[in-house]
Amino acid sequence: MQIKIEDVKHVIAITGMAAISAADTTKNQLGKHALSYEAELEAWVGKLPSALKAEIEAIRAENRNYQALDASVLYAMYVSRLATQQAGWQQGSDFGINIGSSRGATQLFEQYFEHFLQNNKSEPLASPTTTLGNLSSWVAQDLQNNGPDISHSITCSTALHAMLNGVAWLQAGMCDKFLVGGSEAALTPFTIAQMKAIKTYSRASADAQFPCLALDLDKTENTMVVGEGAAAVCLEKGKNENALAYITGVGYATEKLKHAVSISAEAQCFQKSMRMAIEDAFGTGQDDEISVFAEMKNDDQILTFAEMSKQVDAVVMHAPGTIAGDKTEYLAIKKIFGERLPLLTTNKWKIGHTFGASGLLSFDTAMHMVQHGEYEEVPFISVQKPPQQIKNILVNAVGFGGNAVSILVSKA
């Protein structure tokens, strides 16, 4: 079933998108990961390709105020320029901005703190260049938008929470356009050490074929690998002739924690967020009898939630490559979809876990799928039955704190 966009009052059009990660788009990397082993860090990481990084670093030379910015800010500026250019938004036009990060200005903060430890005094730019507001405020300076500028952090679901915020502003009628995004540049020794300390990081040797086994439900140890990257998406309210795809449903939830990094055995937060997004797209109401949009029913036809869930063709999972993270999300998906599972995929085996940017990089994977009707198999898991169509895809993200987001993206 395809949603008739013109009849969905709350639909949000995606008119521009840009994403950067370890994946080298200039090469054919089908079935291959883009991770690299860094001897200095004694760890696998997902680094941006060197040519791309040089292109981004060149932004510093454009404005003397850009020279002292953290890499995470430059990444956000780079993808925001590309996304707004694709959408046709002009400098100085009316649109809001919400870009977030999990770790923030990691590289600069560690650099300035090291200077403080050695000299017992701080550099003058330490405070203004490490505040979380850097992301959206500098993107706003660069694009000269007329509208609200928001930065936030909600761990690894940060980018999809930015999308939630953008949708809320648009549906409330407070803006007609919103730029949302996430950025992360945290490939530092201290960051890697933190992940190793909680025993989530991959211990794969330098010659491992697949250092991150995201979505492998039979792995016997955690295999998460940290990556860097950013993504930005241009949102506009209502049907749009230039739409690349549409956001047709959103869901969110938080679950009770047992400890700082816990998630329940069957990821209750994901069950709630996925159900909410599906109901948002295909119906309204409670329990298993939910009336659907007029374009989806014949007279008084009612779809049950089970029937609604069948309209989802694929799920781009959060699947960070940890035993608990991958398995609990999979069990949550089974609870929602029953025996008829949609296609399941993830990109973290390929580019690593980009923390606060990861949700929109997963969204980028979903966008490619709905636009081109194709997908990349996770090479080390059993081949799945191809879906008959790829029109509606659910994208998941969750972070420390038990906060989950699910976004349903539909073919334009």
Image: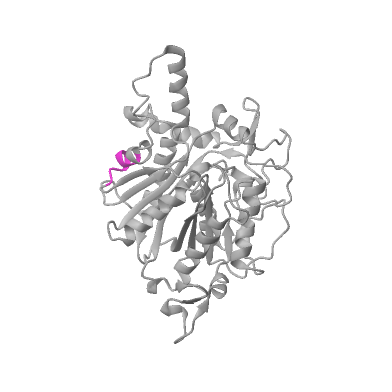
Q: Position of residue 372 (x, y in %)?
A: 55, 61
Say whether residue 188 is visible.
Answer: no
Q: Quadrant of residue 121?
A: top left
Q: Position of residue 170 (x, y in %)?
A: 33, 59
**Front in this rendered view, residue 250 or 385:** 250
In the rendered structure, the answer to whether residue 363 lies left or right of residue 77 reads right
**Secondary structure that dominates the magenta span:** helix
Q: Position of residue 301 (x, y in %)?
A: 48, 84
Q: Position of residue 71 (x, y in %)?
A: 45, 33
Instruction: Give the residue drawn at x 50%, y 37%.
Output: 52
Instruction: Give the residue drawn at x 35%, y 59%.
Output: 236
Q: Residue placed farthest to the top in the image?
A: 119
Q: Residue placed farthest to the bottom in the image?
A: 299
Span colored in magenta: 139-145
In the rendered structure, the answer to whether residue 222 lies left or right of residue 262 reads right
**Front in this rendered view, residue 288 or 50:** 288
**Front in this rendered view, residue 257 or 404:** 257
Instruction: Give the residue drawn at x 52%, y 75%.
Output: 288
Instruction: Give the residue drawn at x 28%, y 47%.
Output: 148
